[in-house]
Amino acid sequence: MVATNRHIEVAHSVNIRDLGGYPTVDGRKLKWRKLVRAGDLSELSENDQQTLLDYGITVDVDLRSNAERKQFPDQIPTQMKFLHLPLFDDDETESRTTNQRLQKAYSSNPRSGYLRMLYAYRRLVVNSQPQQAYQRFFSYLESHGENETVLFHCSAGKDRTGMMTILLLNVLGVSQEVIQADYLLTNELSVPRINHRIALAKKAHMNRSFMASLRDLSSVSIDYYDQAMTLINYEFGGIQAYLRDVVKLSDSDCERLRN
């Protein structure tokens, strides 16, 4: 899994990458410049915006809550369409929360951040709000995907965006091994962001428990991935059943999306 050939470099965001080129189990490959996953877009400069336009992105799908969107609105060019599909009413993943607010919750138990993330992934699978957002996202792709280049994002591009990507790559027939590797690629591309959060915590003299939780909140883990997939397998009958019964995609819907 090479990050450099799919990473879209912009100065004021992290973890923006193309899903093109991934092989499917039936011998095809995903098109480049069609589907892009990303982190926060609220601090994009005019040059950053031009980079995304030049790349061909035509639609920005924001998976963040109303509160996050109000506080940190996306800075996108006027030519780009915008679609808001909040997966949660607030930032359940705490990826944008300040260290001061996190201090009380995460200074006493070094595993509290990790446990919080497992809880967030459970909600991403079983709660009705994210389920409805998944339905609307795929409905939009079916109707408009042929003529659009779609970027979808949350605040760090790792959990809400990660879950949407897991579903999307499954729909498109990518192998579990590749889907898992794409999910974990977030850690490689989030190093500057994680280091910045850790540096701020050190400056504020946070304790070791807090540091451990902050790392767990700021990165992805195979345990988070497994939490989601285990729930999908045991509570919903597997990924294909989840896509059919929860995301409301028929076999013909999936084939249309693949084509």
Image: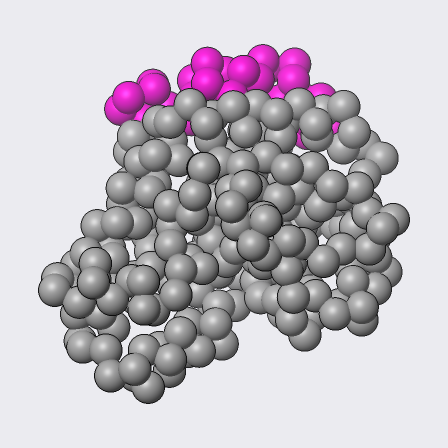
Q: Is residue 253 magenta?
A: yes
Depth check: 132 or 26 in front?
132
Q: Is residue 115 above or below residue 247?
A: below
Does 44 appear above or below 61? below
Residue located at (40% from left, 74% from top): 197
Residue at 38% of width from left, 50% of height from top? Answer: 93
Tell me residue 229's x, y (percent): 34, 35
Q: Is residue 203 above or below residue 142?
A: below
Tell me residue 252's x, y (percent). 65, 14
Left or right placement of residue 22 versus residue 46 in this view: left
Q: List x then y, in percent, for residue 221.
A: 33, 56
**Quadrant position of residue 50:** bottom right
In the visual, does 126 lie left or right of 48? left
Q: Is residue 137 magenta?
A: no
The residues colored magenta run 233-259
| Residue 25 visible in image | no
Colour convention: one colour
Of 27 and 175, the residue lying toward us: 175
Which residue shows up at 65% across the image and 71% down it? 12
Whether residue 19 sits left or right of residue 183 in the image: it is right
Horizontal relation, residue 46 to residue 206: left or right: right
The residue at the point 69 percent across, 70 percent down is 10
Please state, as top left, top right, bottom left or bottom right, where the C terminus lies in the image: top right
Dominant secondary-structure state across the stretch colored magenta:
helix
Against 202, residue 95 (above or below) is above
